[in-house]
Image: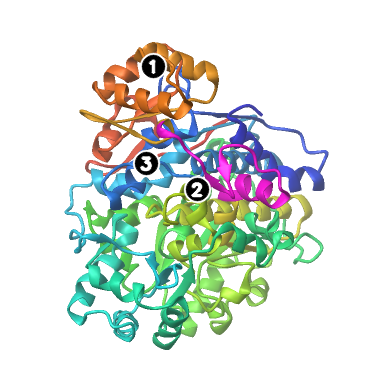
Amino acid sequence: MRGPRLSVETCARRLAPLSARYPEVAPVETRVSWCGPGALPPGRRWSEATIQALCGLMEVHGWDGGRPRRVGLEVASVAAGMLAAQGVLAAHIGALRGRPVSRVETSVLAAGLFLVAHHIAAATSAGELLPSPPGPEPGPPFRTADGRWFEIEVFDAEAWKSFWSLLGAPDAELSRAWTSFRSRYYRGRCAFPPGLHQATAACTLARVAEAAAASGVSLSPVRAYAEVLEHPGPGTWYPSVGEPALTRSGEGHRMTAPPQVGAPHDGHLPLRGLRVVEATSRMQGPLAGLLLQMLGAEVIRVEPPGGDVGRMVPPIAGDTGSFFLCYNRGKRAIQLDLTRASGRGELLDLLATSDAFLHNWRPGKAAEWGLDRDSVASAGPNLVYAEATGWHPVTDNDHLIGTDFLVQAYAGFGDGLNTPDEPPLTSRALLTDTLGALVTCEGILGGLYERERTGRPVPVDTSLLQGAMAAQAHVLEPLAAGTEAGGRRSGRPVWGALDRPIPGPDGWLAVSVETDADLDRLREVAGVDRAGSPPATEAALVERLGAAPVGHWEDQLVAAAVPCSTVSRDLVALGADGRLKALFEPLAGSCVAPASPWRLLP
């Protein structure tokens, strides 16, 4: 395998169980590039930071603060490695089904675009955006009187009002703040009136937790990495939490019939001829289903009577909400009332002729409906049964709503995203939703491979927490082992002036100085001599780079082989960038979203 170091390491880590279990499996040629073939000039140097700048991630991550911010974790590189591993798993499934794939290609840029996919779809749709969030200050996380930060999650407006009333927040501000809070997943922004922050600042974390428990609001402290490593402990975190859990063959049900292989004219996509049924909402499950569809599977989406409420969340692209369309395009939708026995019976009939079933219901709901894995196995003995939750395998958290921002707080993202001198803020970009979806896709692929290989379908458990830990493995494992390298302090990124986006007269520029040679080339282009200390030299370079248009410097730095990129601040322009045309696909009207991140060669 070839590609950026962290992407290659991530791919190898995720394929290690397959290699250990089936050492005779022939390798698949795999390549991860920074930008993909044809996207941008070959030979141009890139880095995690410059890809974050180009794909719009810095812009979305910085929306609350009004300026682009670098994400402190190498999330695009990790996601690219996970996509590469999924491509290889799909290739092996295809080989067993008579659909060989000889080469898998993906890129860090393609992965980065999926981290902001629905924001690009929203920006390029013709519909009106959700109302601007009220208030002058960013929303959660909040700080308490004893210096702790915390995140909350609640879906019910009355529970929201009760929580804040118990803390003494002004009643007049609660409705306005609720409007901003409930739309933050779609907008990537959240701003509150100051009274809510003042209320939490007057209470201890223990008092806030009491109010949350009394009102039915889910709460998690923004945990530091030291807390993450202490509980439940490194033996639990590594490597299991970052990987999907598969009940290995020998413990599942043997298939009653061999898998059907589609006709040759169906194309070379490795999952063609397989059917996946998903009963999911929001993003984690739908994105996992979309990725399986991009690998060739038929995906049938089960929605409640009247359809998924997300279909009407603005902005509207054509006749469907862009967020929903982004992650559910191309799927066949059916409506079933699963609260009725007849609806559950229809679902079981469908599962009897399907290959995988995915749901992200709250813990216990499947059993209440008689749709847990054992019950479904009697109707669909060939089925790979997959659950996508918030917290697996940390069942102590099952009482909490398992959504992106709460998982970020619990998993230590406040440390991983921010330097030691910054508050431990989580990201408004849906990082654990995206990475959790990748883990879910990987888990289903692993389950399908086990089934094809052994004849026994296996259950699959995945979660947002697994996605969060996968994103941080390159930070937490060295920290736990006491082998943390330079560039990190207690797991937090340590950056100089050049490591952050640099403001110019007409935009922002991201550069990467990874070696002394890079610094020398940058100084030569900018015409800056070495100052008395490295920080002084960096400050002089930032001042010089900020004095001329960003395009001027980008052209010169690219020619000098210094990794750099203008920060993409206009997501509409990003979706229309002719250089990136192959990385997008049209949805409805002007709306676009990232296309399949793989190039699979037969």
Q: CA distance from mark 1 to mark 2?
A: 36 Å
Q: Is residue 521 magenta?
A: no
User: Foreground residue, 525 or 281?
Assistant: 525
Above or below, 121 relative to 238: above
Residue 372 seen:
no
Point out the residue furthest to the bottom here.
214
The residue drawn where x is 59% and y is 39% is 81
Percent position of residue 396, x then y:
61, 76
Residue 429 visible somewhere in the drawing: yes
Q: Residues within 10 Å of mark 3 (few under 14, many from 20)?
A: many
Three-letter amino acid code of the residue under disc 2:
Leu
> Which region is colored magenta?
471-497
Does residue 474 show up magenta in the picture?
yes
Q: Nearer the viewer, mark 3 or mark 2?
A: 3
Query: What amino acid is found at the position of numbered circle 3 in the picture?
Result: Met
- Compute the Cα span from label 3 to label 2: 24 Å
On residue 557, the disc is 1
Q: Which mark is residue 316?
A: none
**Quadrant of the drawing holding the C terminus:** top right
Left or right placement of residue 590 versus residue 408 in this view: left
Mark identifier at residue 58: 3
Left or right relative to 449: residue 311? left
Q: Quadrant of residue 173?
A: bottom left
Quadrant occupied by the N terminus: top right
Image coords of residue 577 (percent x, y): 29, 29
Residue behind mark 2:
291
